[in-house]
Amino acid sequence: MARKKVALIGGGQIGGVMAQLFASRGLADVVLFDIVEGLPQGKTLDIAEASRIDRFDMKLKGTNEYKDIDNADIVIITAGLPRKPGMSREDLLTTNAKIMTSVANGVKEHAPNSIVIIVSNPLDTMVTLFQKISGFPTQRVIGQAGVLDSSRFSSFIAWELGVSVMDVNAMVLGGHGDTMVPLVRYANVNGVPIMELLERKYNDKAKAQEVMDAMVTRTKKAGGEVVGLLKTGSAFYSPASAATTMATAILLDQRRVLPCSVYLNGEFGVEGYFVGVPAILGENGVEGVLELSLNDKRRRTSRV
Ligand code: APR
């Protein structure tokens, strides 16, 4: 069986970390593409030179030419500007839309059968734009937002309760920005609802609600919190992990249920938009959407 090939479009912070994750986990051969000459070549060389230490033998190639992504099974797009302090994801729109247009044309020409994961912000707009320009079937176009937002929410819950984050299950749906919706009612530690644990901890319903509200707010602003600390760019380790996890579900046909931005065909009463919902990811890309009941407030804020 031929090895799988992953093409990473954008060899910046997120692209570089992903290249290392795919190679060192033995998931796929990696092509790292960027318009800056030398950048993807230097990063892939650096990662490859650690292969003896970390014991992997995946092939890594850095390139400035689209022909090198030929026949990629999965394409992950991070090309575009990241945020600086004080910027919203929407502030990136004009520049990143131009970049996404050129990337979509390159991917359409050279990897027409690939499954595409988009990370560039503003996420929901970039996913829609990519799909429109490429004309790819919607099943093969997926946006990364919810996996990261849910991981952030889960981390805050674990830190608050003093339990391992591995036992926390929490999901964030909706958009990647102010319209994201952390699902409080469904959040749990190995099945035990978070609100119940908070009420037990504080022995005070109002205080428990206050603590939960603060975690929800921190989740919504978590990207900005990292930007504020880094000052020169936005989060990259966690977005790289999130997109790699989505790609792994597809490469290994895991049918994992991961919150991501997918095109809705009537699910949640929405037709014709990309929205962050729990999606089943497998070898064909989006294999299905898991519907769940949301109360009216959640439905309005998330537009689902
Ligand atoms: N084609 C390919 N790559 C491009 C193009 C293009 N047309 N234009 C810019 N790039 C490259 C840049 O040269 C840079 O190396 O995209 C890379 C982006 O990397 P970073 O600036 O380090 O940004 P990163 O932190 O990786 O974030 C990328 O993901 O989460 C989002 O908001 C974030 O939109 C940003 C994107």
Image (cartoon, rainbow, N blue to C red):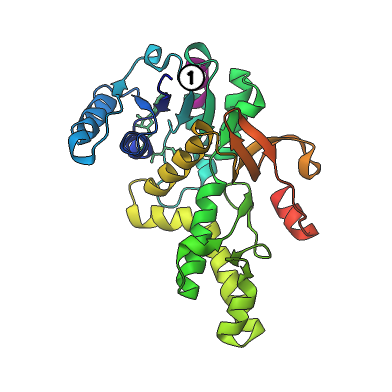
| Left or right for 157, reference 272 | left
The segment highlighted magenta reads 100-107
Q: Which residue is mark 1?
A: 102
Q: Residue at x 24, y 24 (%)?
A: 38
| Left or right for 56, reference 224 | left
The quadrant in which residue 273 appears is top right
| Left or right for 285, reference 58 | right
Q: Residue at x 70, y 51 (%)?
A: 302
Q: Position of residue 122 (x, y in %)?
A: 54, 39
Q: Position of residue 181 (x, y in %)?
A: 64, 56
Q: Residue at x 40, y 22 (%)?
A: 3
Give the class, few, some or many, for how many residues have Cα within 10 Å of label 1's Cα (few <14, many ≥20): few
Q: Amino acid at mark 1?
A: Ser
The residue sitting at the front extreme is 1
Looking at the image, residue 107 lies above or below residue 288: above
The N terminus lies in which quarter of the figure?
A: top left
Q: Position of residue 301 (x, y in %)?
A: 71, 54
Q: Is residue 101 magenta?
A: yes
Quadrant observed for ligand 1 in the rendered image: top left
Looking at the image, residue 184 lies above or below residue 278: below
Q: Position of residue 82 (x, y in %)?
A: 41, 40
